[in-house]
Image (cartoon, rainbow, N blue to C red):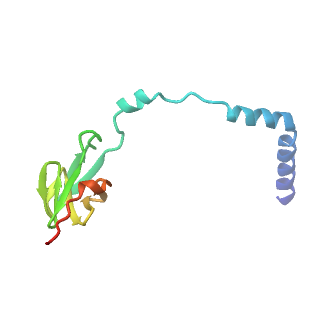
């Protein structure tokens, strides 16, 4: 058995050992050639192929993902532990567009929808912050 295996391995090795340097260089040059892929317009119009299933009390619900344009969340302000998100004031444990507000910080908030977590931050501009001083 060992002799047969050794003979088969040596024959296999000898069959693939005849590659020349030129053949290898040709293979590498084919790899480096620019290949035409899918156009961006085609990708943008393609529907997402993944569907999430949620099972609750023996009822299966198909959750179809929402497009990014429809699911825009924007944080405009934070005052006294409340956040102004999408033209509404929200506090911890409030829901907005399927997400639950979990944390309100000084410069941002954390939203959660199942396993998906989104972090929204205020703009970086220092001019947009209002500071109050006592006199």
Q: For the C terminus, which image quadrant? A: bottom left
> Which of 58/71 is in front?
71
Residue at image location 41% in from the left, 27% down from the top: 41
> Which of 44/19 is in front?
44
Q: Is residue 55 left or right of residue 31?
A: left
> Relative to 96, does residue 39 appear above or below in the rendering?
above
> Which of 126/64 is in front?
126
> Which of 80/1 is in front?
80
Residue extending farthest left: 89
From this viewpoint, is residue 122 visible?
no
Q: Position of residue 125 (x, y in %)?
A: 31, 53
Residue at image location 24% in from the left, 46% down from the top: 62
Q: Is residue 61 left or right of residue 34?
A: left
From this viewpoint, is residue 124 visible?
yes
Q: For the N terminus, which image quadrant? A: bottom right
Q: Position of residue 33 (x, y in %)?
A: 67, 30
């Amino acid at each position: 058995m060992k002799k047969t295996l050794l003979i088969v391995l040596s024959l296999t090795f000898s069959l693939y050992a005849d590659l020349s340097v030129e053949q290898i260089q040709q293979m590498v040059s084919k790899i480096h050639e620019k290949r035409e892929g899918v156009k961006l317009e085609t990708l943008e119009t393609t529907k997402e192929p993944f569907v999430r299933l949620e099972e609750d009390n023996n009822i299966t619900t198909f959750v179809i993902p929402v497009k990014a344009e429809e699911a825009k969340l924007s944080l405009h302000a934070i005052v006294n532990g409340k956040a102004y998100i999408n033209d509404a004031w929200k506090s911890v444990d409030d829901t907005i567009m399927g997400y639950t507000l979990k944390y309100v910080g000084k410069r941002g908030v954390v939203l959660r929808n199942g396993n998906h977590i989104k972090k929204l931050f205020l703009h970086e501009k220092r001019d947009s912050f209002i500071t109050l001083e006592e006199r």
